[in-house]
Image (cartoon, helix red, strand yellow):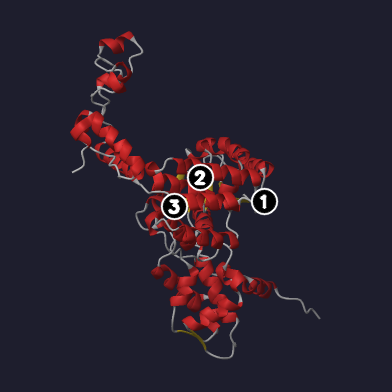
Amino acid sequence: MDFGLSEEFAIFADEMSEPLAERMRPRTLDEYIGQKHIVGEGAVLRKMIDAGRISSFILWGPPGVGKTTLAQIIAHQLETPFYTLSAVTSGVKDVREVIDRAKKGRFFNSASPILFIDEIHRFSKSQQDSLLGAVEKGVVTLIGATTENPSFEVIRPLLSRCQVYVLKSLEKEDLMLLLHRALENDPILRERKVDLQQTGAILRYSGGDARKLLNILELVVESADPGQTLVITDALVEDRLQQNPLAYDKDGEMHYDIISAFIKSIRGSDPDAALYWMARMIEGGEDPQFIARRLVISAAEDIGLANPNALLLANAAFDAVMKIGWPEGRIPLAEAAVYLATSPKSNSAYMGIGNALSVVKETGNLPVPLHLRNAPTQLMQQLGYSDGYKYAHDYPGNFVVQQFMPDQLQSTRLWHAQHSPAEEKLYQNMLRCWGDRFKEE
């Protein structure tokens, strides 16, 4: 007598052993929740998918917002081979092997196989270099996923070959849709009697992370008596999570809230709060490089010209962490955090480049005035290139009034001084040079 499982029952048993987040993974774009700005009707990525051809791109966003799922849906819809690598476990050899398989498996005039690399920010420079040729020649279409800013983590040659799409944390409406869909459609949960009375805690703890939301829901359901109606309230969710806090601590739901609190404490000149939030990140297992990067950004954005030494010290702290490692690296990080928090603040440079980018977008490619153009050839000289340019060092104080902006923007102001002691000196120098042009109203 055969007591073995039937094939159908074995498949069903495998599905039931999967976590809820995996069972609820969308299979099509119509099932996909959130990110309407890139995959909604008429959105740029949706148009490419519907057209059947996509170019290489990188998905940048927090955990649990659907980066891996979106890549799998695209490969399924385009009916193209799908290769996946994890930057944590794969090396250059693995990359080359996948590229070789992609070359051999591609048919004439068919869409390029998709190579999905999770956590691409963890790839070393040599690993990223090994991708360049295959991406440029179309041997594979690269889809990278990262929680870190690609500008810092992806080498420039590879970044220039990829479009970057920013994925956002899921909104309350998205999370509520996912919550009800799980309770109604999941083969296990729909057999349970669940009364969803309150959702505030489960939404708060999920932090816009779909995976975390489903993990919390599964934890709450599994901890209840299956024979009784489960009434989900905020108090119940908080009680259950306290029983298993480690499941939601490391890189947990407060990750982005805590880094926000850390930066805002520095901006608000509160060194005690800055140290507290840094300690929370350290205890939560945050990557020290992530903290160091945010310090460098804060030094440039929030302290800026009020104390230019802040950027130097933040960079030095970053270098020190890379050299001495952990746990000693917490000391230069703390030094930088306190120094930044106690420094005078100015975001005039940050606002200035923002103003400049806005003007460029509005006005386009305005011509460079002739006297500012380079004149390396005789023809250019005859055309008036560089004619009339005044060399500042030939004049008293190494300054002479002349036009540097395009003709249409001669009176446009982009940088506005903020009058901390250090920046006031810069402002007064501009007044001496330019007079009323820099005079604040």
Q: Which residue is mark 2?
A: 314
377 left or right of 290? left
Q: Residues within 10 Å of mark 3 (few under 14, many from 20)?
A: some
Q: Residue furthest front?
A: 421
Q: Residue at x 49, y 83 (%)?
A: 235
What is the C-alpha distance between the residues marked 1 and 2?
A: 31 Å
Numbered disc in front, either 3 or 2: 3
On screen, residue 191 above or below 364: below
Percent x, y for residue 411?
A: 19, 34
Q: Amino acid at mark 3?
A: Thr
What is the C-alpha distance between the residues marked 3 and 1?
A: 41 Å
Numbered disc in front, either 1 or 2: 2
Q: Earlier in the sequence, mark 1 or mark 2?
A: 1
Residue 231 visible from this viewpoint: yes
Callout 3 touching callout 1 (CB < 8 Å)? no
Q: Residues within 10 Å of mark 2 (few under 14, many from 20)?
A: many
Percent x, y for residue 133?
A: 57, 35
Percent x, y for residue 265?
A: 43, 58
Q: Amino acid at mark 2?
A: Ala
The front one of 212 and 342 is 342
62 left or right of 429? right
Q: Residue at x 40, y 69 (%)?
A: 172
Q: Which residue is mark 3?
A: 342
Numbered disc in front, either 3 or 1: 3
The front one of 265 and 155 is 265
On screen, residue 232 above or below 402: below
